[in-house]
Image (cartoon, rainbow, N blue to C red):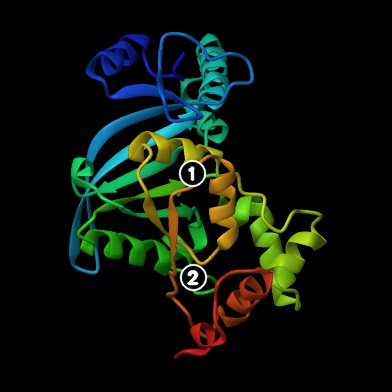
Amino acid sequence: MFSYIDPTVRERLVAQGTLIRIDAEGQVTDPHHAPEPGARALSILGPIPLPLERHGRHYETTWYASVRHTELARAQELADELRERGGQQSFAVLASSMAVNSVLLLGDSDDWSNPLVRIHSSCLTGDVFGSERCDCGPQFFSALERIADDSAGGMIVYMSGHEGRGIGLWAKAATYLLQDAGENTYQANRSLGLPDDSRDFSDAAALLKYFLGDQPFRLLTNNPKKVDDLNALGLSKITRVKHVCGVGDANKEYLAAKREWGHDLDPEDIDKP
């Protein structure tokens, strides 16, 4: 089962090797058979050449799109229902059932040795709008630049379902209003009855296992908990690399709260001009 793509196209993609399915350990499985109930499985589309441009610099990347099998199955049910009702114009609702994560590869993965990796949580306000309330946009584009410049190559795993540390864009907007009333980013989550950080890195771990195998890698993050979460998911050969950028007057309190919560941020990291 693949979502709402025509089954004949699906079979063509499978035959080309551009549509595969992996399990939680990153192992390729048979895309023609549904996973066991409760088993985590991801479908991956790619490779897709994706040239990027940022501030006049060009990057040659290879893009893979990934989504959980359970979300594809739900999208298929919606697609079948829409077809029966003749509601093709409503197919956009299918996107609401799928958090499609992305992988960007830089360099020849066959030549990687201890590659540089960034697992980046989606942030519409920072990555797209250029918000200065957080450091997300600068972190993403700095990671792209650092990996492109690194002789070992590497990859970015972009987690689309991680907006607002996993609470979603609507709740994130509410936390911004609470922050403007005096709460910090974590207090605002708690005021809404939400966890400080509800992100799930299991899909990212499966993708890393598939693309990297068992080799060591360096992870661009200031968050030791992210490394702990990946360790718990079976990835132990991780060297954490500090990744401070995008610091400004509008986000110093935000970064100070992250430091208090456990991020590896020194006072001079936050206070630098």
Where residue 45 sits in the image (x, y, percent)?
Answer: 34, 29
Q: Earlier in the sequence, mark 2 or mark 1?
A: 2
* Place of residue 152 in the rendered image (x, y in percent of width and height, measured from the top left): 23, 55
Q: Is residue 208 left or right of residue 193?
A: left
Rendered view: 236 above or below 124: above
From the image, tell me which residue sits under label 1: 235
Query: Which residue is nearer to you in this view: 174 or 107?
Result: 107
Q: Is residue 209 left or right of residue 61?
A: right
Expressed as whole percent of the image width and height from the top left, the position of residue 11 reads 31, 11
**Quarter of the image containing the C terminus?**
bottom left
Which secondary structure lies at badge 2?
loop
Give me the C-alpha separation between circle 2 and circle 1.
26 Å
Q: Residues within 10 Å of mark 2 (few under 14, many from 20)?
A: many
Q: Evaluate if marks 2 and 1 touch, with contact meaning CB atoms under 8 Å apart.
A: no
Is 154 above or below relative to 68?
below
Q: Which of marks 2 and 1 is in front?
A: 1
Examine the rendering and report whether any part of residue 129 can be seen: no
- Position of 267 with respect to 48 (left or right) is right
User: Where is residue 215, by image quadrant?
Assistant: top left
**Residue 171 occupies quadrant:** bottom right
Give the label on residue 135, or none: 2
Q: Which amino acid does label 1 sit on?
A: Leu
The numbered disc on residue 258 is none
Say whether residue 156 is visible.
Answer: yes
166 and 110: which is toward the camera: 110
